[in-house]
Amino acid sequence: MAPLRFSANVSWLFPELPGVPERLHAAGRAGFEAAEVAWPYAESPQALASAARAAGLRLVLINTPRGDHEKGEMGLGAVPGRQAAFREGLEQAVLYAKALGCPRIHLMAGRVPRGADREAVKGEMETVFVENLRHAAEVLAQENLVGLLEPINTRITDPQYFLDTPQQAAAILQKVGRPNLQLQMDIFHWQVMAWESDWKHQGVPAHRWACASGTGPRPRGARQLWRAGLYLPVPAARR
C-alpha cells in the first residue's frame, strides 16, 4: 500500500487566522503539500491560486456552495425546489476548481427541510439528488473533474443532513451510474454511523471496505488518500 498523504483542510485548521490565504500560508509552513477549502467563495479564485502557489500547496478538494446559510442550508443537491440554485452553484464551483487546478468537488446533498419527516421526503429528495448528480457528472466530465459524495453523520454533526450513511451514498451512485462520481470516505462520519461489522453486512461492498481499511488492494480508478478519507469508485448500475 502506498504511503498515506494528508492535506490541510483550512476551513477548520488554523482558526486563529482571519482568512483562507493566511491559513494556506500556515499550512505550507507546517509542512503540508496539499490543502482543501470547503467553501472558497469569499475570496477570488485568483487570490486563492496565488496564495496556494506562494505556500507551495496543491488544492485537492472544494465543496459546492452551501446555499443560503442564514436559512440553514448546507448544500442543495437533494433539496426539492432548489435545482436551479444547485446548478448555478455547480457552475461557480467548476470555475473555482479550474482556476485553482483542483481536481475534485464535493457535491453537497443538503439537509432535510425543517419540520419535514425524513422518511416521508426521502424518496423525493433522492429523485432530485439523482437528477442533479447526472447533470453534475456531465458538467464535470467536460472539465475532467471528479465529483464526490460524502455521507455526514446525523448522530453528532448534522441531524438534518440528507446523505448520512455510506450505504445510502453507494446506492445513489449506482443509480446515477457515472464513473466520474465517487464515494468519499470520511472516517469520522462513517465510524459514528456504523463501524466495520455494519459496513460489511449492510450494503457496503467488501472490496471497497478492504481498500478503505488498508487491508487489500486499491480498486482500479480509486483515488489516492489526501485526507482522512478515500475517494472510491462505485460500479455503475446494470442496465
Image (tube, rainbow, N blue to C red):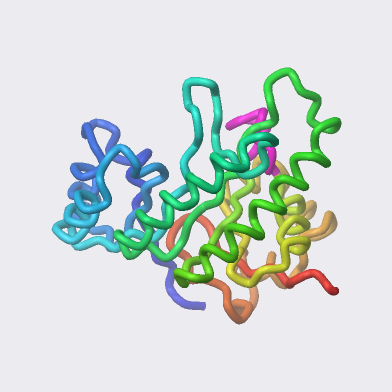
Which of the image's four quarters has the C terminus? bottom right
Give residue 218's quadrant in the image: bottom right
| Most foreground residue, 5 or 43 | 43
The percent coordinates of residue 194 (x first, y second) are 73, 46
Residue shown at the point (45%, 57%) measured from the top left: 227
Residue 148 vertical placement versus 85 (above, below): below
Give residue 81's quadrant in the image: top right
Q: Is residue 107 magenta?
A: no
Label tally: 0
From which residue to which does the magenta span run?
152-164
Give residue 79's quadrant in the image: top right
Residue 31 vertical placement versus 20 (above, below): below
Q: Main secondary structure of the magenta part?
A: loop
Residue shown at the point (45%, 69%) measured from the top left: 143
Residue shown at the point (23%, 56%) measured from the top left: 49
Q: Is residue 161 magenta?
A: yes
